[in-house]
Image (spheres, coloured by chain):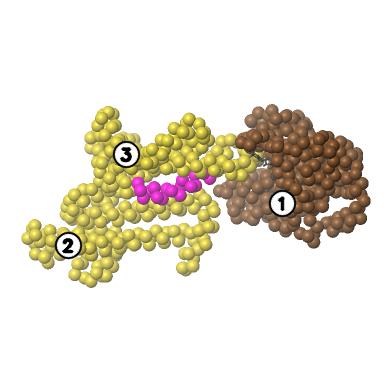
Amino acid sequence: MLRKIASSYLLRRVAKALITIFVMASLTFFLIRLMPGSPVEAYIANLVTQYNVSYENAKQQAASLFSLDLNAPVYQQYLEYLGNLARGDLGESLISRGVPVSEIVLAYLPWTLFSIGTALIISFSLGIMLGMLMAYKRETKLDHILTNLGSIVSSVPDYLMGILILVWVGVQWELIDITNMRGSLSPGIQPGFNLTFIGDAFYHASLPIITYVLGTIGLWMLTMRGSTESTLGEDYVTVAKARGLKERRIATAYVGRNAALPPFTQLSISIALVFGGSLLIEWLFVYEGLGYLLYNAIQQRDYPVMQGVFLMITTMVIVANLLADLLYSRLDPRIRVAGRD
Amino acid sequence: MEGRADVLSVRELEIGYETGRGLVRAVRGVSFDLGDDESLAFIGESGSGKTTLGLSLVRLLPQNASIAKGEIAFRAASEEVLDLTTLDDEDLRRFRWEECAMVFQSALNALNPVMRIRDHFADTAKDHSETNGSLKGRALTERATECLEMVQLDPGRVLGSFPHELSGGMRQRVMIALGLLLNPRVLILDEPTTALDVLTQRAIIEVLRTLKVEHRFAMIFVSHDLSLAAELADRVATTYAGRIVELGEVEQIFYHPRHPYTVGLLDAVPTLAGGQQELSSIPGSPPDLIDLPTGCKFHPRCPYATDKCREEDPPLIEVAPAQTAACWHWEKVGSDWEARGGEIHERDANRA
Ligand SMILES: Nc1ncnc2c1ncn2[C@@H]1O[C@H](COP(=O)(O)OP(=O)(O)O)[C@@H](O)[C@H]1O
Ligand code: SF4
Ligand SMILES: [Mg+2]
């Protein structure tokens, strides 16, 4: 059985993701529970001093909020926490009493996924195309301009990019109405599969998306330029010409297809960076995703929600990485073999 | 071999590479004809311009190369004579692989690593469907199967494989099979056995020999190894410093060479007992193609060299019917060789 798992790339990769999620969840548990001045203790202390609740009572409340039995030994608390997690129970919000954290997190999650997913798809495909264009037109003016642009945008941190967009485009030039763009949907718009909804969703997500695209596209452009240049020197490309294949097919199925592999391997790193960056960017543009939720939770010291957001973001990054890796192994047949030993 | 029509005629071809150090004169005044089911081998030390010549025949020279002079006339299947030096892009694209296929020196990396072998056959057929009619679905599989069987591969196993799943020798054979797909008039093979182990070399040679006997198309081999020519060629051209220095029927070249360089190459052919061996028996090294010696380019290494050799470059002249050599002293070279006769025949017996 173990042998079988070890020999299947897919199973091995999924197992690795599950273990990572497990480790992250455990770390979160011990950080929140065991550190001096942990949220649980802080919450209890707060209840006791501010509201004059008895310590026992406060502890009771804390336990139900974090969905924990605080009297039990730590290992038992830990097991219970894991059990709850497995059932998707993340406790209840401190601020919106009685509302499960999972419900809150799930309400904000789609917006983050939507904006980041769209941005990565746009950025990756556009970056790949530009990078290829640069390599095909190498040492021309176009190449020089794009290379410089690429290195400039990739060296500006994404929050700075966000601030620049906000200040110049929104405030200085007043090109767009940033107050109107706040939130993830305009008032009165109902989610549904129609143009009004989709258009509005894109409208509100546009600034975060532009920021993420600008933050990542430079990397794709430059990596793709380099890998296209080296792919153009590969024997199979010369041979494809000798085989009288059409220029277009050689550019796509031979050059592009192979040259896109190195940038693709960087997708995993990029996903984590963009998720991390989104916490600030969403706050900056008041875009109601997980980052925005986290910001509010921190402000209001809503620890269970903070914990929920952390767990969710970690899980999303790990799952996205898993998907990227699995996709990569489909794109590069050599991986499936190489990954075996 | 009488009455054959020439499929390819090359005249006074000159090719140079522009480099920082100067012009590399890789091909200098090469002329030859290729009959339409003939097999011609170009044999010479590494750096003598063989690959450059091969690439020019499919017009795939590197960016820094240019054809300074000369003609390449190709008689296509339609009997139309194409001037390869002036063909436009689209005609050139169709010419490649339909009329003339080339298996490259570095064929190990010649297949797209992310595509299955079947798809290599499919896209080649597809991009040549204007002239060849569309070959797809079952007809394509049948034709690909046929080609793979010609090179003694198991189509069932190979068609669905990715290149990395095949050994070097199998990939080489896949390239040859792919070359046969569109029934080209000429198949060029650049060092078809170099970089393969001895057993695989044997297998490839067998495959090529069968192809040569059973199918009617012309082949050009390029190799540094004269023994390959012995097995596969009808005619052999030995090349030195970008030039053909001797050209003749395979028997003439092996049994009656008239150029000291050909003699040197023959002496370097490894016997079966000796195994694989470098071409070390010609002392010295090939000349700098940017700054060539005066007179005969072989004179610094030639045991027969005289003052005349150092001053004047010998023309390629007829030394026997259908055999030409570029040497002032070919008669002396020839009589010395014939005097060694006994020794040579013994060696040939070993080789066979
Ligand atoms: N792209 C290139 N640029 C400059 N010189 C080259 C290039 N390719 C080959 N040459 C030179 O041209 C000469 C002939 O090379 P080549 O045709 O590869 O010979 P062979 O195939 O006989 O070994 C060599 O001196 C080689 O260094
Ligand atoms: S011409 Fe002179 S130098 Fe050249 S090969 Fe003949 S004998 Fe040797
Ligand atoms: Mg070569």
The disc labelled 1 sits on which kind of residue? Thr
> Where residue A41 is drawn, which disc sits there?
2
Tell me which residue sits at (42%, 59%) in the image: A14
Q: Is residue A67 visible?
A: no
> Where residue A204 is drawn, which disc sits there?
none
Which quarter of the figure has residue B133?
top right
Q: Position of residue B263 (x, y in %)?
A: 83, 48
In the depicted view, which residue is nearer to us: B336 or B316? B336
Which quarter of the figure has residue A181?
top left
Q: Position of residue B19 (x, y in %)?
A: 63, 36
Which region shows up in magenta? A256-274
The disc labelled 3 sits on which kind of residue? Met
Q: Could you tell me how far apart the alpha carbons at marks 2 and 1 are, in whole angstroms?
A: 76 Å
Residue sitting farthest toward the bottom: A73
Residue sitting farthest toward the front: B307
In the depicted view, which residue is nearer to us: A322 or B280? B280
The disc labelled 2 sits on which kind of residue? Glu
Describe residue A3's horizontal placement relative to residue B68 as left or right. left
Q: Chain of mark 3?
A: A
Which sits earlier in the primary sequence, circle 2 or circle 3? 2
Q: Are marks 3 and 1 in contact (CB under 8 Å)?
A: no
Q: Quadrant of the C terminus of chain B?
A: bottom right
Q: Chain of mark 1?
A: B
Which quarter of the figure has residue A167?
top left
Tell me which residue sits at (27%, 28%) in the image: A173
Instruction: Identify by letter the chain in brown.
Output: B
Residue placed under numbered mark 3 in the picture = A161
Numbered disc 1: secondary structure: loop
